[in-house]
């Protein structure tokens, strides 16, 4: 045992500058991990905890690799490469998070969505973040190549050639979504907090985060998060339920009502439906009156449309449910039947 202790002491006495640096970085991250995890200024405990756990995981890996490199000290075991690789990944993750937090605090916008307050991306901040992410990936990749001494690739093709080969080989998996993300962010067409619908994918929800490759959407029906490729937002029809300078946000519900009911009675009925829903649900624009229109005289029934104004886009599905419920409850009061009448076809017998 004493021999082992003496050997470890000798190893500590003979530590190189890179090993001291590894220990210092590991200690720095361990002490300030909570502060680093909250650099984005968000009130989202889940995301802060995820960042904190990730930093602690890196801490454990780097410290374990550091101890192994001290204890092993064997030419046949790549202890230094493992330690330096772990340090490289930790510094890359640390640099990206610090840079991202600084960019958000300088160029981001502070908004609150469903009780979660944070600095959110703007077109400028997201573009700068993607540039930083690309630079970190390139630098860390080249550093890892040098650590493991597989520089033959760089010597043969050069760093630029190697990166070109790497990008070309993997472009089908990420390039389309990466470029789509830059286009979406640069055009400022989608922001965190926007309510969007992608009918072809049967998705309707709130945009929570636009990533480099994927956009995270919180489903309005089930409340869970959905990650969709950025390219799907550009390649599919996307509806935006948002307030803008082009006019107030409107939505509607259609009702099939049989023939034989007077227009006056239907208008009174639909106005009563709207008033009842307005008392039971928030999110309707109470300063604007709804409009009622006849959309189609079909074979079985007449399709009437109740159009109303929405002040809170994320409540659009709840508002539809409240209007449908009020319409069902008020049928008997106005002697109206919402069930679609069936045509009776008489067959003459010869």
Image (tube, rainbow, N blue to C red):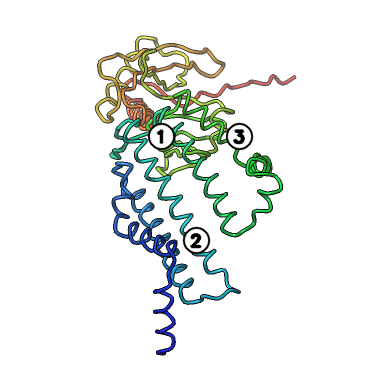
Can you give x and y, in whole percent of width and height, for residue 227 in the image? Answer: 49, 42
Can you give x and y, in whole percent of width and height, for residue 208 in the image? Answer: 40, 37
Q: Secondary structure at mark 2?
A: helix
The residue carrying mark 1 is 206
Q: Observer-nearest residue: 179 or 151?
A: 151
Can you give x and y, in whole percent of width and height, for residue 21 in the image? Answer: 40, 60
The residue carrying mark 2 is 84
Of marks 2 and 3, the one in the foreground? 2
- Position of 185 relative to 32 (above/below): above
- Position of 31 relative to 276 (above/below): below
Q: Residue at x 30, y 13 (%)?
A: 289
Q: Secondary structure at mark 1?
A: strand
Circle nearer the N terminus (1, 2): 2
- Disc 1/disc 2 C-alpha distance (Å): 41 Å
Quadrant position of the N terminus in the picture: bottom left
**Which of the 4 image quadrants contains residue 269?**
top left
Quadrant position of the C terminus in the picture: top right
Of marks 3 and 1, the one in the foreground? 3
The residue carrying mark 3 is 176
- Disc 2/disc 3 C-alpha distance (Å): 33 Å
Q: Secondary structure at mark 3?
A: helix
Q: Residue at x 27, y 29 (%)?
A: 282
Circle nearer the N terminus (2, 3): 2
Q: How many numbered markers are drawn?
A: 3
Pointer 3 local density, CA inside 10 Å: few below 14, some 14–19, many at least 20: some
Pointer 1 local density, CA inside 10 Å: few below 14, some 14–19, many at least 20: many
Residue 187 shown left or right of residue 53 in the figure:
right
**Which of the 4 image quadrants contains residue 67?**
bottom left
Of marks 1 and 2, the one in the foreground? 2
Circle nearer the N terminus (3, 1): 3
Can you give x and y, in whole percent of width and height, for residue 163 in the image? Answer: 63, 42
């Amino acid at each position: 045992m004493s021999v082992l202790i003496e050997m470890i002491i000798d190893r500590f006495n003979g530590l190189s500058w890179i090993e001291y640096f590894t220990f210092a970085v590991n200690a720095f991250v361990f002490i300030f991990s909570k502060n680093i995890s909250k650099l984005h200024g968000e009130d989202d405990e889940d995301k802060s905890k995820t960042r904190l756990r990730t930093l602690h995981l890196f801490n454990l890996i780097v410290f374990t690799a550091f101890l192994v490199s001290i204890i092993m000290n064997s030419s046949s075991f790549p202890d230094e490469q493992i330690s330096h690789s772990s340090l490289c990944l930790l510094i890359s993750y640390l640099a990206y998070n610090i840079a991202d937090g600084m960019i958000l605090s300088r160029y981001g916008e502070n908004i609150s969505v469903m009780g979660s307050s944070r600095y959110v991306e703007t077109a400028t901040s997201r573009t700068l973040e993607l540039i930083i992410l690309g630079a970190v990936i390139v630098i860390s990749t080249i550093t890892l190549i040098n650590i493991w001494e597989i520089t033959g690739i760089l010597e043969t093709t050069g760093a630029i050639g190697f990166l070109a080969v790497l990008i070309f080989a993997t472009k089908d998996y990420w390039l389309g979504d990466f470029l789509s993300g830059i286009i979406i962010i640069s055009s400022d067409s989608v922001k965190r907090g926007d309510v969007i619908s992608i009918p072809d994918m049967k998705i309707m929800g709130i945009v929570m985060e636009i990533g480099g490759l994927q956009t995270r959407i919180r489903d309005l029906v089930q409340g869970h998060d959905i990650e969709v490729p950025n390219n799907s937002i550009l390649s599919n029809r996307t509806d935006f339920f948002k307030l803008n300078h082009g006019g107030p946000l409107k939505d509607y519900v259609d009702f099939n009502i049989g023939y034989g009911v007077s227009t006056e009675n239907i208008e009174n009925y639909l106005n009563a439906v709207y008033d009842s829903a307005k008392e039971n649900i928030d999110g309707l624009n109470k300063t604007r009156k709804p409009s009622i229109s006849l959309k189609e005289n079909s074979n079985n029934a007449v399709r009437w449309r109740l159009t109303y104004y929405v002040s809170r886009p994320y409540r659009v599905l709840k508002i539809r449910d409240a209007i449908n419920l009020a319409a069902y409850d008020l049928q008997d009061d106005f002697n109206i039947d919402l069930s679609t009448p069936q045509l009776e076809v008489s067959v003459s017998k010869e």
